[in-house]
Amino acid sequence: MGPAHGTMTAFSTIVVALGERSYEIRIGRGLIAEAGTHLAPLLGARGTGAEMIVVTDRNVAEHHLGGLEDSLRASGISSRTIILQPGEQSKDFAHLARLMDDLIGAGLTRDSMVVALGGGVVGDLAGFAAAIALRGVDLVQIPTTLLAQVDSSVGGKTGINTAHGKNLVGAFYQPRMVLADVTALETLPRRELLAGYAEILKYGLIGDAGFFAWLEEHGAALIEGDAAARMEAVARSCRAKAQVVAADEVEHGERALLNLGHTFGHAMEAETGFSDRLLHGEAVAMGMVLAFELSAQMGLCPEADAKRLRAHLEAVGLAADAAGYGFTADALIGHMRHDKKMRGGRITFILAHGIGEAVIAPDVEPAQVERLLTRALAAHGAG
Ligand code: GLY
């Protein structure tokens, strides 16, 4: 049984402050079952006759769609649902075209609201569709994975992949609200939970050494299912991201800090064909270690901080070491040359002066990166 219509259990609120486009991230337990109560006020003068179109995937639908639909119905909101194939392969032009046809063919109007229920793929694809359909219809994100709750659903990045790489076509398009229901994490496979944890850790590494220390203490409990620790970690992560996004929405500057570990990570994902062999968060975890080791090699950061990061990843069960995958330095650098962050022969990296002190380094010599990777990729088994 869901809650009675109109009830709301306690939740935390974080505001992404973007003037007229400001919105709330609400974090709590059971928010999907109460979604109608949270979302109805967003319809404003349109009234509850305006339609919500829920976009989700088959796996997420199995666990969460019924609860969401019941809740919308209980609030008098009419909705219909489009169910996508799960997986990264849905984030391409062909699937976008099909989704646009489904949305528009079934009578989407400017009063409609797209509700993205799912992980990063659903959020990115449905978000981009909402950005361009009829030149933009309202969007709500209901992230159901840890990665989506702490990163991809917040801040308005939407888009699809092309044959040349990930997320190369897209738009900054902010949602009207993000509802992060931490009970959704209970049905998440452990591997996906750990991959999302890497993005949580990222916020500590970028700008909050105290949060990193908190994660050293509570990270294992959070992964094992401690609901209070999950709430706290999601809220602290979203607060950190909201601040960065409010200061630099379209990534002219400090938002790039959120890409810590991502230049290495994307190269590793490209090398494994963006397949299940290596999840995004797993690549980011190893990429963050490489970013700290590169920082140490360049004399920017104490070696001890790179070791501390490595030790924490190992303690929670995330691989720290990229050496076991058969990557070569040349292949990874080759992928980096196609990254969005490449400018004039040099690669922009996010480096660090220490834990909690990340910096943008726009001018890293490929030779430095090659030296690091040659050493790191050969070190497998060396401890
Ligand atoms: N995931 C990085 C960003 O949203 O900027």
Image (cartoon, grey):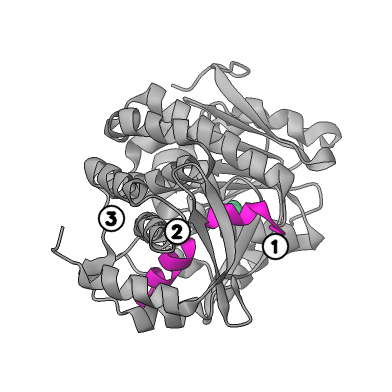
Q: Position of residue 274 (x, y in %)?
A: 39, 70
- Disc 1 CB within 8 Å of nearest ligand 1 atom: no
Please tell me which of labels 1 and 2 falls first in the chain. Answer: 1
Q: Amino acid at mark 3?
A: Ala
Amino acid residing under circle 1: Ala
Q: Residue at x 46, y 36 (%)?
A: 209
Q: Residue furthest front?
A: 299
Give the residue at mark 1. Answer: 171
Q: Which residue is tagged 2?
A: 261
Q: What kind of element bears circle 3?
A: loop
Up-down relation of residue 364 to residue 70 (above or below) = below
Labelled disc at residue 262: none
Which mark is in front, 1 or 3? Answer: 3
Mark 2 crowd level (few <14, some 14–19, many ≥20, 10 Å Cα) = many
Read off the magenta span.
251-273
- Specify whether tag 3 is near ligand 1 (CB below 8 Å): no
Task: Indicate which disc residue 320 carries.
Answer: 3
